[in-house]
Image (spheres, rainbow, N blue to C red):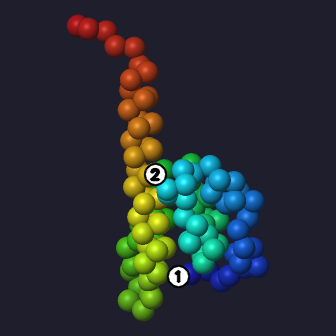
Amino acid sequence: MRQPSSPYDLTLNLAAEAWLRELPQQVAPAALASQFPRIANRLARFWDSPRMIDEYMEQLLIPKRSKRKGFPDKVLAELYALSEYHRARRAGAQNRLWDSLPYRKP
């Protein structure tokens, strides 16, 4: 169930603005931020928590309520690109972790 809107959901917060500036331009969700600042604020808050961002992205991309309108095409495309970027970024971080461990040949 969606939480009631708060006045803070109507505009981007400072953390979301900083997060958008840090993202590569090709995946920064500008349309999402302007049309759905509440969602951009949450994405920024969850960005460094893989479990939280995965769960939130799933909620956004896989509708479970039948009466949901869905996102405009541009916003949906941005969400998919952002999701893929996050997945690739996380996979790269995991690979770097394993590469950094000392390896001894048997």
Q: Residue lying furthest front in this view?
A: 25
Name the outermost residue toward the bottom: 67
Image point (31%, 9%), residue name: 104
Marked residue nearer the N-terminal end (2 or 1): 1
The kind of residue on which mark 2 rests is: His
Whether residue 106 sits left or right of residue 82 in the image: it is left
Q: Would residue 104 be found to the left or right of residue 87 on screen?
A: left
Marks counted in the figure total: 2
Circles 2 and 1 in contact, beta carbons < 8 Å: no
Q: Picture quarter containing residue 55?
A: bottom left
Residue 29 appearing in the image? yes
Question: Which residue: 47% across, 66% down?
Answer: 78
Q: Position of residue 52 (x, y in %)?
A: 51, 57
Question: Looking at the picture, how far across and down is residue 18, in whole percent?
Answer: 69, 54
Q: Which residue is mark 2?
A: 86
Question: For numbered disc 1, what is the local secondary structure?
Answer: loop
Which residue type carries mark 1?
Met
Q: Position of residue 75 (x, y in %)?
A: 49, 73
Few, some or many residues within 10 Å of mark 1 (<14, 14–19, 20+):
few
Marking on residue 1: 1
Measure how far apart labels 2 and 1 are at the Cα level: 26 Å
In this rendered view, identify the residue nearer to me: 19 or 47: 19
Residue depth check, mark 2 versus mark 1: number of the one nearer the observer: 2
Helix, strand or loop status at disc 2: helix
Residue 39 visible to an observer of this rendering: no
